Image (cartoon, grey):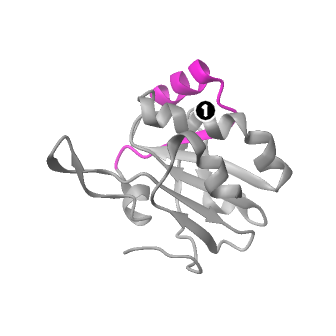
Amino acid sequence: MKLEKGDKAPYFEGVDENGNHISLNDFKGKKLVLYFYPKDSTPGCTAEACDLRDNYERFLAQGYEVIGISRDSSASHQRFIEKYSLPFHLVADTDCSILKTYGAWGEKKMYGKTIEGTLRTTFVIDENGVIDDVIRKVNTKNHTSQILG
């Protein structure tokens, strides 16, 4: 299933870096940037997270919450957050259920081989739980400008 602008954001729930449950329902009435990324502390994922961190106040000023999701464990997320002072929560999707629900898991090319993995994707969700934008070609160093313009 390929989600598009105008679709209702699928329900998700998971556990963050502190073991707290987070679900789509926690963001009712709020705007949400839900970004899927392959792996904590890798160059591209670090660049993306740090760009979002550096512009976090801009997101808050425009009414957005930011949540990152990857296959990494809560402990890995905790280390990633501490190392780079990330101000937002990261959800551990170790069974890939949220990734698959959002179409952020699939075939991709890596080093000339076709593998299954995380498809770096960002969903901008409005206050009513409707997808306002889908970014599939993420510029990790300038992702904020792709989201906020």
* Residue 33 shown in magenta: no
Which residue, as the protein is rendered here, is positioned at the far right? 61
Q: What residue do we see at 43% from left, 29% from top? A: 43
Which residue, as the protein is rendered here, is positioned at the far bottom? 6
State the image coordinates of residue 56 (x, y, percent, origin top left): 74, 40
Identify the residue under disc 1.
Answer: 50
Q: What residue do we see at 75% from left, 54% from top? A: 64
Asked if 47 appears above or below 105 in the picture, the reply is above
| Secondary structure beneath label 1 | helix
* Residue 94 shown in magenta: yes
State the image coordinates of residue 19 (x, y, percent, origin top left): 56, 35
Asked if 88 appears above or below 1 in the picture, the reply is above
Q: 28 or 5, which lies in front?
A: 5
Q: 102 or 142, which lies in front?
A: 142
Asked if 145 appears above or below 45 in the picture, the reply is below
**Residue 16 at least partly seen:** no
> Where does the magenta region start and end?
75-95
Apparent side of residue 148 relative to residue 12 in the rendered image (left or right):
right
Mark 1 closeness class: few <14, some 14–19, many ≥20 residues within 10 Å: many
User: Residue 18 appears in which quarter of the rendering?
Assistant: top right
Apparent side of residue 45 relative to residue 49 in the rendered image (left or right):
left
**Residue 138 at least partly seen:** yes
State the image coordinates of residue 13 (x, y, percent, origin top left): 53, 55
- Quarter of the image where the N terminus is located: bottom left
Which residue, as the protein is rendered here, is positioned at the far left? 113
Apparent side of residue 26 relative to residue 67 in the rendered image (left or right):
right
- Quarter of the image where the C terminus is located: bottom right
Amino acid at pointer 1: Cys
Q: What residue do we see at 75% from left, 69% from top? A: 127
Q: What residue do we see at 60% from left, 68% from top? A: 133
Give the number of marks. Answer: 1
